[in-house]
Image (cartoon, coloured by chain):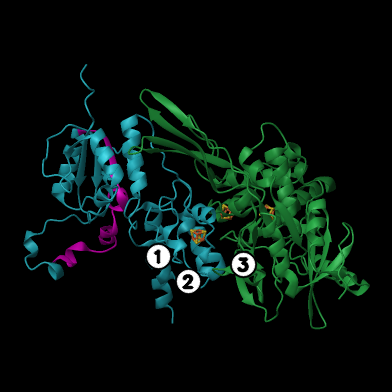
Amino acid sequence: MAAPRKPRLAVIKFASCDGCQLSILDCEDELLAVAGAVEIANFPEASRAVLRGPYDLTLVEGSITTPHDAERIHAVRRDSKVLVSIGACATAGGIQALRNFAEVGSWVPLVYPTPDWIQTLKTSTPISHHVKVDYELQGCPVNKHQLLEVVLAFISGRRPFLPSHAVCMDCKRRGVVCLTVARGEACLGPVTRTGCGALCPSYGRGCFGCFGPLRGSANTGSLSAVLQGHGHSHEELMRLFRTFTCGAEAFRKASELHEHDASESHERP
Amino acid sequence: MQQRPAAATRQSTIERKDLHRLFEVLRARGYTVMGPVARDGAIVWDELSTPDELPAGWTDEQEAGRYRLVRSDGPALFDWTVGPASPKASLHPAAVTLLNARREGPALRLLECVPQPTRLAFFGLRACELAAIAVQDRVLLGGTPTDPVYRARREGALLIAVQCGRAGRTCFCASMGTGPEVRSGHDLVLTELLEDGRHLFVAEAASERGGEILAELPATDTTAAESGAVQAAVARATAGMGRTLETEGLPALLARNPEHPHWDVTAARCLACGNCTSVCPTCFCVTTEDFTDLAAGLSRRVRRWDSCFSVDFTYIHGGNVRSSSRSRYRQWLTHKLGSWHEQFGSSGCVGCGRCITWCPAGIDITEEARALRQDQRGKEGSRGNA
Ligand code: SF4
Ligand code: SF4
Ligand code: SF4
């Protein structure tokens, strides 16, 4: 009896730092087991052998920032049975989505000696803005355990288990004393989806929001009011919401409101 | 100093300097001592090896959404009110492995995960914490089936209370009838006294075990003055409650008001972060997560604290039952103060104030109940007048 065909895995990169792909390589012991359970068809960070599609499972890293990539993602989608976007870039546009708040054309000549050679879009957008995505795995970078979970769930034909509660609950489960309540520090934990296990708060640093807004219930307006009550300025809060997941709708809007209010308060004498 | 074995119902007085004896006696009996420490800007529960680790000279300031640990400049060990953590983390842990399974050829072998009995001595429980343990006893051991994880930890637990001599700004145990006086559920109760340059603990046993432990400590007969000081300390805490909650008729009132406009006002502030349920010493909800370790061929099922504020808490086929934070907050408050009575025979709230202090948005369960009641009264009043 022939062994069942192993599912074919591809890992495809768009505009990103490669950190999420490296999280796969960081799986160490389990990586060998995964490599035994799937056929790694296309994963340039791991293997030079690149096999053409179609693929059963495609992990997509990075955001769409060039006209060429906006085309290429459609080809990737056509080649993939299940497509999972991984990381803050692929799910929210990444730190490079800061360009969405500015005029990218004015930066190009400052950075590149031959601006004419640069073909870039005005925005950095997540994969889901371009094609249908089956699952999104948030994080900057993604949590390697969650990444393994997605791959293992796929192999065993079940739904991946990806908790959706706020970072705060992980603080409480770990016994981390709340930085906002006990010290007045700015923290995005109450509006951020878990995934990291409250990594930053456990080291005494407020949450940066790497895993993006809480699905459906990110009450950024209330959190802004709370943090202002602890003495944080509009400018600070604009920056707080505008980091790795600044392109996510809820955080984008919150940062724009603070930007607006900050400029108003500057204008006032 | 005349030493004598303490009778189970009599008070005896222990000097602060002899408190280490209590720790030695507890350890000799095989207990791990859990108690309060000042860490990361708050009073939290931790494993203790000596009374010198207790938070001497620390006190706290609490308000809705705000907590500060501050120096009190005195030798007092218990001059604070409850912090974010509670014995819940030890008796009903945030994460427990329920099951391991290994693939052996075509078969699946379940590896037993029998909850290990623990012997924890909780030193420094407040009246509200004893009341919360009693609530969890009813919830987790009161019906069938019971929770074997909780049982294994609870049955071996020794409960040593220290009465409050001061109430915090978010405390309302007096309204809930759970404190500040320690009345039941404990093995031993102490009250800290700082009088005339002396640092004392007036102790009283409430169980046989408690009496045996007390009998091993160097103690003197408690004087009338010391007994009076204990009463005065409790009276001071009673008078100092920062919050009140009118409980009369509350379950019925809440049941009548599922569409009260005030739920929208609260929903606008609520972050759905689950801090309230996590710090609440009576909240017990859990979820299970399965993990696969491909390399080891092992599957693990872990139980974790969950919250009625998590988006997927009510996920069933087709979607979530409570998708808005309005419905989630309403569930939390009406369960805690209302339907809990019907389900478990008491309020689900012991008035510890944790959910008020540790809610980043400062949402105050006593204010919420008041708002629901007052608008309701207004309505009834105007109807009556018409
Ligand atoms: S530190 Fe941040 S994530 Fe943790 S409980 Fe406080 S607000 Fe939530
Ligand atoms: S009531 Fe407060 S602590 Fe509870 S979920 Fe809402 S914001 Fe979080
Ligand atoms: S509802 Fe709030 S005040 Fe009542 S027991 Fe729970 S945490 Fe304490």
Give the residue displayed 40% in from the left and 36% down from the top.
Answer: B298
Dot 1 alpha-carbon crowd within 10 angstroms: few under 14, some 14 to 19, many 20 or more: many
Q: Is mark 3 within 8 Å of ligand 1?
A: no
Say which label, 2 or 1, has the lower sequence index.
2
- Image side of residue B64 versus residue A153, left or right: right
Residue B310 among those drawn in magenta: no
Same chain letter for marks 2 and 1 = yes
- Image side of residue B327 versus residue B144, left or right: left
* Image mark 3: chain: B
Give the residue displayed 74% in from the left and 62% down from the top.
Answer: B243
Which mark, by number, is residue A232? 2
Question: What secondary structure is found at the residue carrying circle 3?
Answer: strand
Residue A123 at what x, y percent from top left?
A: 24, 55
Question: Circles 2 and 1: CB distance less than 8 Å?
Answer: yes
Q: In the image, what residue type sits under mark 1?
A: Leu
Residue receiving disc 3: B37
Q: Colour of chain A?
A: cyan
Q: What residue range appears in magenta?
A: A80-108
Question: What secondary structure is found at the residue carrying circle 1?
Answer: helix
Residue B305 at what x, y percent from top left?
A: 55, 46
Which mark, by number, is residue B247? none
Which of the 4 image quadrants contains residue B51?
bottom right
Q: In the image, what residue type sits under mark 2?
A: His
Residue nearer the viewer, A114 or B360: B360
* Image mark 1: chain: A
Q: Colour of chain B?
A: green
Residue receiving disc 1: A240
- Image side of residue B337 versus residue A194, left or right: right
Q: Is residue B375 visible?
A: no
